[in-house]
Amino acid sequence: MTNAVAGGPNMRVAVIGAGIIGAAIAYRLARRGCTVTIVDRHQPAAGATRRSFAWINAGAKTPASYHDLNRRSLEMWNRFAGELATEVGLRWGGKISWANTETEARTLVERVQQLQSWGYPCRVIDEAELRRLEPNLNPGKVIAAEYSEIEGQVEPQLVVAACLQWASQAGAVTRYETAVTGFSLAPTGSRIQTVHTTGGDLACDLVVLAAGVDTTELASKLEIEIPQDESPGVVVRTDPQPPLLRSVPVLYPPPVDAQHDEIHLRQTHDGAVLIGEGSQESLHRDDSQEHADDLLSRATRYLPALHRARATPVPVGFRPMPIDGYPVIGFTPAVPNLYVALTHSGVTLCPLLSELAALEIFEGTRVEFLRDYRPQRFTESVA
């Protein structure tokens, strides 16, 4: 099925949002020959991208169709990073998690069995193998552990910088610290012809709306409904440390006690350790120094080499979260030259969604397996 919008060289595209999804789409379109302008009300990667834990995975994604979408994108990361041809902190080696109660151990084993039935390379391991993988760990009581061997990490700010550099070399123009204030439609029809910003008007043939949490408000200016949940999250960062992890870049230890959530941690390419807690449903908002110190203390329980580290709180960040939890990607029927790109798992899905968005925009095609993720699902049945 062909979309009403078909691109081509010199098509004028306004990309609203310079996070990891917007920057990657801008990069792909600029290299295809589109005339791209990138607009962001802040600096690049200043929103959810900067605060992301940046774990590349498909293991925590359900149902099977959404798992497969993430798995496909995970397996594109090497090629995508190779195209960018610069250091983006991409590191593989997997993730390990473990349980210290019988109830959580049963849940862990059931989760592994489900993922294995979907063909995902993960397995239950014992404490001895956990310690062989990461000798610096002090895991405490281990009833069951999981090793998901194909997962990894990346530094999203470096990805954004590389995408924007390539886009600029291909002729893209950037307008940062520039807010979008509205849109003007063509006198006939419902196509956007002008994006109004605090830095002046921007004539365009097509708009990519990849503004993260701001997507809902901006879409509403065109009377388009893209509902989101509020999803705050806190990740703290330590000062640079010597290499702490030998084999596996991402750790998901259990809670230290019944009064706390589980934590997760990884070490970045520059030695800093990122520490978060809970899941995307946890909705943590405490970005105080006291809370940062507490997270570091809990992490040090499992990784004693952190005992000299200092924690720096990162201001609470609000993550894009479509109301049903799944990506919103595609043209909107009401405004046929508006392309929405909104997702929670932006780091994992970046290579795939940006490639498919560029394909749909430039070639005028419609990728069938994105059918369940179209914007119109919030107001009508997907055609």
Image (spheres, grey):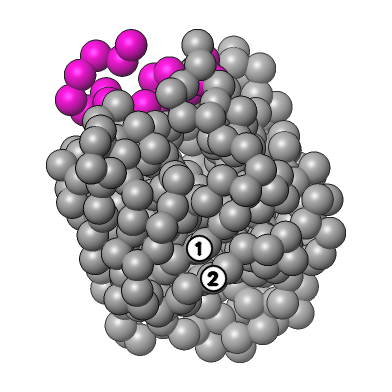
Q: Amino acid at mark 1?
A: Ile
Secondary structure under tag 2 reads: strand
Q: Which residues are magenta?
A: 366-383
Label 1 close to label 2 by CB (< 8 Å): yes
Which residue occupies 79% across, 44% down? 78
Label 1 and label 2: CA atoms lie apart by 5 Å
Q: Residues within 10 Å of mark 2 (few under 14, many from 20)?
A: some
The answer to whether residue 323 is visible is no
Position of 166 relative to 248 (above/below)? below
Residue ranking furthest to the front: 187
Position of 355 relative to 382 (above/below)? below
Q: Position of residue 55 (x, y in %)?
A: 58, 51
Foreground: 350 or 318?
Answer: 350
Task: Quickly name the residue at label 1.
Answer: 38
Left or right of 340? Residue 246 is right
Q: Earlier in the sequence, mark 1 or mark 2?
A: 1
User: Mark number for residue 376?
Assistant: none
Foreground: 12 or 129?
Answer: 12
Q: Residues within 10 Å of mark 1 (few under 14, many from 20)?
A: many
Position of 210 relative to 88 (above/below)? above
The answer to whether residue 289 is visible is yes
Q: Position of residue 99 (x, y in %)?
A: 49, 42
* Count of number-bearing discs: 2
User: Mark number for residue 174?
Assistant: 2
